[in-house]
Image (cartoon, rainbow, N blue to C red):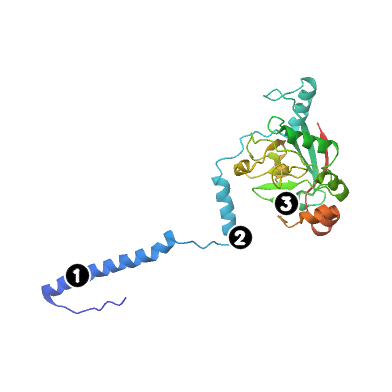
């Protein structure tokens, strides 16, 4: 808006100047307010630069006030846990015998030859039917050579489609009933994936996010927790995200995954401790 400037003289000229300046200040304030409204109340444009994304990731991590409070046992303590289980028939606070399962993995960070181990403790008081199925699959060496085909940082790592389509076919129609959710999906917990009520078969996911409690309301009941080697779990290759087709894995198994997604982290072998 253009404001005309008038030349005045004497006292009347001073008063006119004062009036003019007041009007100018008011107009400037109004203009600034109008410009600020979209900024404070409008939709802000999201930045997509790597630097700003990294800043967001850092702020997101710092903002996670609700995380898993479980203490992870160092790998050096696993032998002691195993010894207690043999010598003292170690039990958890509910009086149930503990079962520990060690997972050896390959292709950590997508690097061939890079391996690691993590240990899962079964929690039958959380999900008795789920634990029974998990141990059944472990005894059958089902997890061996299974690829982590869905890896979403700060959320979940999903696996459990066998690399041999014939083996997978035997389990696909053998679903178990749901267990009620009595423990939250905290970081480090292990849970069966589902496609609806009473559809748990072989697919599992590890919660790597700290804000996955919303899964509780959807009926996902954890069967155990990673007590050692969570740093190894965090190194599962994640660049493929959700690209692998579950349908093609079911049909072609590891032949399909090795050809199209060779860097996927996979389970080398499992064993009871």
Q: Looking at the image, which is closer to me, 151 or 5?
A: 151
Q: Which residue is mark 1?
A: 19
Q: Looking at the image, which is closer to me, 191 or 108?
A: 191
Residue 176 lies in quadrant: top right
Q: CA distance from mark 2 to mark 1?
A: 52 Å
- Tell me if residue 16 comes above or below residue 122 in the rendering: below
- Tell me if residue 25 comes above or below residue 156 in the rendering: below
Q: Nearer the viewer, mark 1 or mark 3?
A: 3
Assess disc 1: are there few (<14), some (14-19) or many (≥20) residues with their C-alpha within 10 Å of its C-alpha: few
* Residue 238 x, y percent position in the rendering: 71, 53
Q: CA distance from mark 2 to mark 3?
A: 23 Å
On screen, residue 79 versus residue 219, left or right, reads right
Q: CA distance from mark 1 to mark 3?
A: 69 Å
Q: Nearer the viewer, mark 2 or mark 3?
A: 3
Residue drawn at x 31%, y 68% as measured from the top left: 28
Assess disc 3: are there few (<14), some (14-19) or many (≥20) residues with their C-alpha within 10 Å of its C-alpha: many
* Residue 96 x, y percent position in the rendering: 72, 25
Helix, strand or loop status at disc 2? helix
Q: Is residue 235 visible?
A: no
On screen, residue 261 versus residue 185, left or right, reads right
As drawn, the label of residue 50 is: 2
Q: Which residue is mark 3?
A: 150
Q: Earlier in the sequence, mark 2 or mark 3?
A: 2
Q: Earlier in the sequence, mark 2 or mark 1?
A: 1
């Amino acid at each position: 808006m253009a404001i005309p400037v008038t030349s005045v003289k004497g006292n009347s000229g001073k008063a006119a100047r004062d009036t003019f300046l007041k009007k100018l200040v008011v107009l400037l304030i109004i203009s600034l307010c109008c410009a600020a409204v979209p900024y404070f109340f409008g939709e802000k444009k999201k930045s997509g630069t790597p630097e700003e994304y990294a800043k967001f990731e850092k702020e997101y991590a710092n903002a996670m006030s609700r995380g898993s409070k479980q203490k992870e046992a160092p790998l050096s303590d696993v032998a002691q846990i195993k010894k207690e289980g043999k010598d003292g028939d170690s039990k958890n606070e509910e009086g149930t015998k503990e079962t520990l399962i060690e997972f050896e993995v390959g292709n950590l960070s997508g690097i061939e030859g890079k391996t690691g181990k993590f240990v899962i403790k079964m929690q039958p008081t959380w999900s008795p039917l789920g634990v029974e199925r998990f141990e059944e699959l472990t005894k059958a060496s089902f997890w061996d050579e299974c690829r982590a085909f869905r890896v979403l940082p700060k959320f979940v790592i999903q696996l459990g489609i066998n690399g041999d389509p014939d083996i997978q076919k035997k389990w696909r129609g053998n679903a178990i009933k749901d267990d009620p959710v009595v423990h939250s999906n905290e970081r480090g917990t292990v849970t069966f994936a589902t496609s609806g009520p009473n559809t748990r078969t072989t697919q599992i996911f590890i919660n790597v996010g700290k804000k996955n409690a919303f899964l509780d309301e959807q009926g996902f009941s954890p069967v155990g927790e990673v007590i050692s080697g969570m740093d190894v779990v965090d190194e599962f290759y994640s660049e493929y995200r959700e690209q692998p087709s579950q349908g093609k894995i079911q049909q072609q198994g590891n032949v399909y995954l090795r050809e199209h997604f060779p860097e996927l982290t996979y389970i080398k072998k499992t064993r009871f401790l």
